[in-house]
Amino acid sequence: MAFCNTLIVRTFTQTAAMAAAIKNVTVIGSGLMGAGIAQVAAQTGHHVTMVDIDEVAVGKAKDRIGASIQRVAKKKFAQDPEAGQKFISSALEKLQISTDAISSVKSADLVVEAIVENLDVKKKLFAQLDEVAPSHAIFASNTSSLPIGKIAAATNRKDRFGGLHFFNPVPVMKLLEVVRIPETSQGTYEAMCDWGKAMGKVTVECKDTPGFIVNRLLVPYMFEAVRMLDRGWHAEYPENTLFEPCELLTNMVAEGKHGVKSGKGFYEYNKK
Ligand SMILES: CCCCCCC[C@H](O)CC(=O)SCCNC(=O)CCNC(=O)[C@H](O)C(C)(C)COP(=O)([O-])OP(=O)([O-])OC[C@H]1O[C@@H](n2cnc3c(N)ncnc32)[C@H](O)[C@@H]1OP(=O)([O-])[O-]
Ligand SMILES: NC(=O)c1ccc[n+]([C@@H]2O[C@H](COP(=O)([O-])OP(=O)(O)OC[C@H]3O[C@@H](n4cnc5c(N)ncnc54)[C@H](O)[C@@H]3O)[C@@H](O)[C@H]2O)c1
């Protein structure tokens, strides 16, 4: 029992230490997602370096952040514009830009990659960063569709590797999928979740499966919308199995499980 308690205390201490240690964040890629991630990280008190191979892109990203943060401040400090101005200047002071990925990770506690969706390009980048980043630094990819395990394989820090899948527009969307591979240590996983919460996000644990959770649902839904457009809206397709009632739903309806209005469905609801 004493051994068990010691182990729990030690694990807790290590995890808390890793999470507390995430102060310096390097975001690689300053496109739609990278700029959003960098912005929210700076807004929430982190020292952020945003990197891009394209000097023009990273400059434009900083301008976009300036415009987006105005919108955030207007909403967040609607009653106190002075506090809003302080919020903006404090965040922008914490944000550096660079075109040199190698030097930008030298004091990073967390590296979030949001570059082009290409496995070889991501692997090449992480292999280079692995050589120079501090050993404690956690690496994460924001990929929409590539297996995290395949990207992590390019490094010697699979225990400190995971997915941090944000949603567009990052300053607005609350959800963050935190993806773990079998090698991701518990400390790394918890540090990623704690960092996500510090970013003001709601974190959800995902396994490293195609599409994680959201895109697994979203992409077939989007494709189906496009197929509908493709074949015309007016036709009826009674033979299409997509429209067949599911047995599970039929049974739930028969059992009176109508969701919120009946107090039970997939969940139980407390009616007040
Ligand atoms: C395998 C292939 C995969 C392909 C798909 C990949 C998918 C990917 O992996 C995952 C995803 O991202 S899935 C996609 C997941 N994403 C979604 O599902 C999102 C879908 N989109 C939406 O839900 C709506 O368009 C929004 C809620 C974003 C905006 O609401 P709207 O009704 O269009 O109205 P509005 O007038 O514009 O804005 C209203 C207020 O919102 C605020 N604000 C907005 N943008 C901001 C910004 N950039 N900055 C700061 N603030 C911003 C601001 O306060 C603004 O007020 P203001 O007074 O005007 O400043
Ligand atoms: N767009 C979305 O809605 C969305 C949502 C969630 C996740 N993602 C994922 O986020 C990643 C980025 O997507 P995006 O939409 O921001 O792309 P984007 O094209 O807007 O931006 C990518 C940026 O990366 C830069 N870049 C490319 N190679 C680089 C390298 N080797 N080093 C440094 N910078 C490099 C490009 O110059 C570009 O500015 C992708 O993996 C994508 O799948 C996208």
Image (cartoon, rainbow, N blue to C red):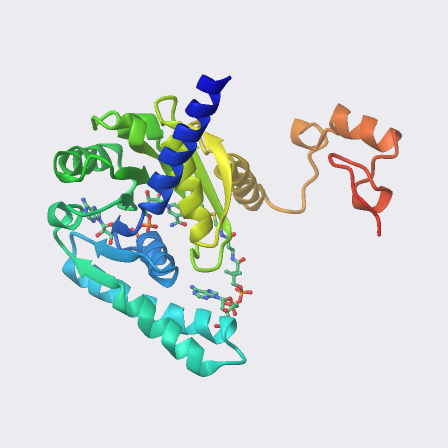
x 78%, y 36%: residue: 265
Between 169 and 162, which is closer to the camera in this rendering? Answer: 162
Between 95 and 220, which is closer to the camera in this rendering? Answer: 95
x 75%, y 26%: residue: 248
Is residue 74 among the parts visible in the rendering?
A: yes
Between 156 and 67, which is closer to the camera in this rendering? Answer: 156
Is residue 227 depicted above or below 169 in this figure? above
For residue 53, side relative to residue 119 (left or right): left
For residue 160, side relative to residue 262 (left or right): left
Q: Quadrant of residue 58?
A: bottom left
x 26%, y 63%: residue: 95
Q: Quadrant of residue 256?
A: top right
Between 239 and 124, which is closer to the camera in this rendering? Answer: 124
Is residue 105 depicted above or below 91 in this figure? above
Could you say where residue 187 lies in the image, as x and y percent from the top left?
38, 32
Could you say where residue 103 lies in the image, as x and y percent from the top left?
11, 49
Could you say where residue 183 lies in the image, as x and y percent from the top left?
34, 22
For residue 238, side relative to residue 99 (left or right): right
Is residue 143 among the parts visible in the rendering?
A: no
Q: How many marks?
A: 0
